[in-house]
Amino acid sequence: QEAITDMYAKKLLQEGVVNEEWIQEEKINYEKICEEALREAKSDKRVLLNKDWLDSPWKGFFKKGYTPSLPVRPTGIPLDTLKHIGKVFSTPPGGDFKIHGGLRRILKARHDLMEKGYVDWAMGEALAFGSLLMEGVHVRPSGQDVE
């Protein structure tokens, strides 16, 4: 299958927006940008800004002389706590609550993951939210999945 960049280049050529020389120059420039980024990524240029974090900040992002003012708190929680949160997040409400079959399957899949000791992205979020809530931290989800 033809690359989208080649398809777009052909379209621009056909419409007379650019010429072949310009396209080749842009490809060469883009390749240089990618090669430079790869060299930078492979380099050992890392700036230790905080003993708890290993950062490689953007050039000029931090002011000269910047030092983090707050230490990073330990974030680990006991495995038993994670198992408890996982159990709660994979159990439907009790009583006469009628649960949709699709949701029942989702909760069972979460339960099965926890039984096997695995965590997917959604369960990881649930465990993170649950652990924060257990510590008394208010959690307000936001983003594309929140209306």
Image (spheres, rainbow, N blue to C red):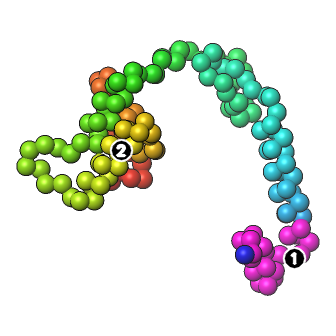
Disc tally is 2
Q: Nearer the viewer, residue 84 or 7?
A: 84
Q: Position of residue 15 (x, y in %)?
A: 77, 84
Where does label 2 land, which residue?
Answer: 112
- Residue occupying the point 30% across, 30% down: 84
Q: Nearer the viewer, residue 43 or 23?
A: 43
- Bounds of the magenta segment: 2-24
Q: Nearer the viewer, residue 17 or 24?
A: 24
Q: Secondary structure at mark 1?
A: loop
* Picture quadrant where residue 132 is located: top left
Q: Please say if 59 is above or below 8.
A: above
Q: Position of residue 43 (x, y in %)?
A: 82, 33
Q: Main secondary structure of the magenta part?
A: helix
- Residue occupying the point 79% across, 79% down: 10
Label placed on residue 19: 1
- Residue occupying the point 78% across, 73% down: 6
Q: Residues within 10 Å of mark 2 (few under 14, many from 20)?
A: some
Q: Secondary structure at mark 2?
A: helix
Q: Is residue 9 magenta?
A: yes
Going by the numbered disc 1, the residue's amino acid type is Asn
Sequence-earlier tag: 2 or 1: 1
Going by the numbered disc 2, the residue's amino acid type is Asp
Q: Position of residue 96 (x, y in %)?
A: 7, 49
Label placed on residue 44: none
Q: Position of residue 137 (x, y in %)?
A: 32, 26
Q: Residues within 10 Å of mark 1 (few under 14, many from 20)?
A: some
- Extreme residue toward the right, this view: 21
Assign the N terminus to one quadrant of the image: bottom right
- Extreme residue toward the front, this view: 116
